Image: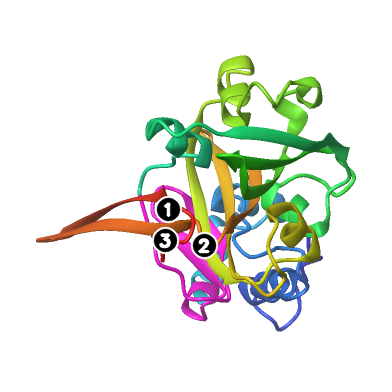
């Protein structure tokens, strides 16, 4: 909801905008990693100058509530310290295929749903707009490895809920069937204990650790198209990264590796 700005009161307009943005963040209307509209768009919507919007955003960046990523935009900061792992967006299934590891996919649910506040915020869709929900379990050697919850802003891919996701991968459908090239994504990793559902579907005790990953995938125009919640069985996976540090710049690569059962 856009703020009603007082243009004659004692409070500067940029401070009113800053207060509104802070409220959106603190109320959860803008979830962690929510991407803000561009400064030009916000200036037009609020009927103020771009400099006024930028001043409000800059102060919130200084306070740690927002973070600006060069060439990507401005996002709501996460509560936890984050460290980039890799620069290439490779899906879990693509990583397995690249390593020649056979896997099965069990589709547990696929339907259009009404999004929660978090989902609508991260996908930049209205709370009353349907999104596509896909729930799957991936198995390697007959053992469940990952539980995936995917949410897709389906306005650009009508009918996606009818696709056969036992045969096709989600990004494959988005890119090949609908012509929606995914350009980049943001991932965060966190160690967690599993929910009862995750423990049951991964066939582990609720006390066993899992790796949780949140991923938001973006199209070339910068709009979010897909949100993933991914739970990875803790005793079968490890994260690995190769980091290079050079003069004036650095780069990273990383991947997810399958470890045999019982391998520490």
Which residue is denoted by mark 3 in the rendering?
A: 263
Which residue is denoted by mark 1 in the rendering?
A: 259
Alpha carbons under labels 3 and 1: distance apart: 6 Å
Furthest residue to the left?
A: 247
Label 3: which secondary element: loop
Quadrant hosting residue 113? top right
Q: Which numbered tag is attached to residue 18?
A: none
Quadrant hosting residue 171? top right
Q: In the displayed structure, does residue 109 sit left or right of residue 165?
A: right
Residue sitting at 63 percent across and 71 percent down? 208
Circle 3 packing at 10 Å, graded few (<14), some (14-19), many (20+), is few
Asked whether disc 3 touches disc 1, contact meaning CB atoms under 8 Å apart, the reply is yes
Circle 1 packing at 10 Å, graded few (<14), some (14-19), many (20+), is few
Q: Relative to 97, is 23 above or below?
A: below
Residue sitting at 56 percent across and 70 percent down? 191
Which residue is denoted by mark 2 in the rendering?
A: 235
Q: Position of residue 251 (x, y in %)?
A: 24, 53
Residue sitting at 57 percent across and 24 percent down? 172
Alpha carbons under labels 3 and 2: distance apart: 7 Å
Q: In the displayed structure, does residue 102 sit left or right of residue 229?
A: left
Furthest residue to the bottom?
A: 10
Q: Where is residue 210 in the image (x, y as percent from the top left)?
A: 59, 65
- Quarter placement of the N terminus: bottom right
């Amino acid at each position: 909801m856009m703020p009603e700005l007082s243009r004659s009161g004692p409070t500067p307009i940029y401070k009113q905008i800053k207060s509104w943005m802070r409220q959106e963040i603190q109320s959860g209307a803008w979830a962690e990693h929510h991407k803000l509209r561009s400064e030009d768009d916000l200036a037009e919507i609020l009927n103020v100058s771009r400099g006024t919007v930028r001043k409000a955003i800059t102060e919130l960046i200084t306070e740690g509530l927002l973070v600006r990523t060069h060439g990507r935009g401005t996002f709501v900061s996460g509560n936890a310290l984050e460290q980039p792992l890799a620069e290439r967006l490779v899906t879990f299934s693509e990583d397995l295929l690249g390593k020649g590891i056979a896997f099965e996919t069990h589709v547990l649910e696929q339907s259009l749903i009404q999004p929660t506040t978090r989902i609508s915020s991260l996908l930049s869709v209205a709370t009353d707009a349907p999104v596509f929900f896909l729930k799957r379990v991936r198995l390697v050697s007959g053992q469940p490895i990952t539980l995936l919850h995917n949410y897709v802003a389906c306005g650009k891919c009508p009918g996606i809920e009818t696709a056969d996701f036992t045969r096709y991968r989600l990004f494959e459908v988005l890119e090949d069937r609908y012509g929606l090239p995914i350009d980049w994504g943001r991932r965060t990793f966190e160690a967690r204990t599993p929910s009862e559902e995750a423990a049951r579907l991964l066939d582990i005790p609720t006390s066993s650790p899992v790796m949780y990953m949140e991923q938001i995938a973006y199209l070339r125009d910068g709009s979010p198209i897909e949100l993933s919640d991914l739970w990875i069985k803790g005793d079968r996976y490890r994260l690995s990264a190769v980091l290079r540090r050079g003069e004036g710049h650095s780069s990273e690569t990383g991947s997810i590796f399958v470890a045999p059962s019982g391998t520490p």
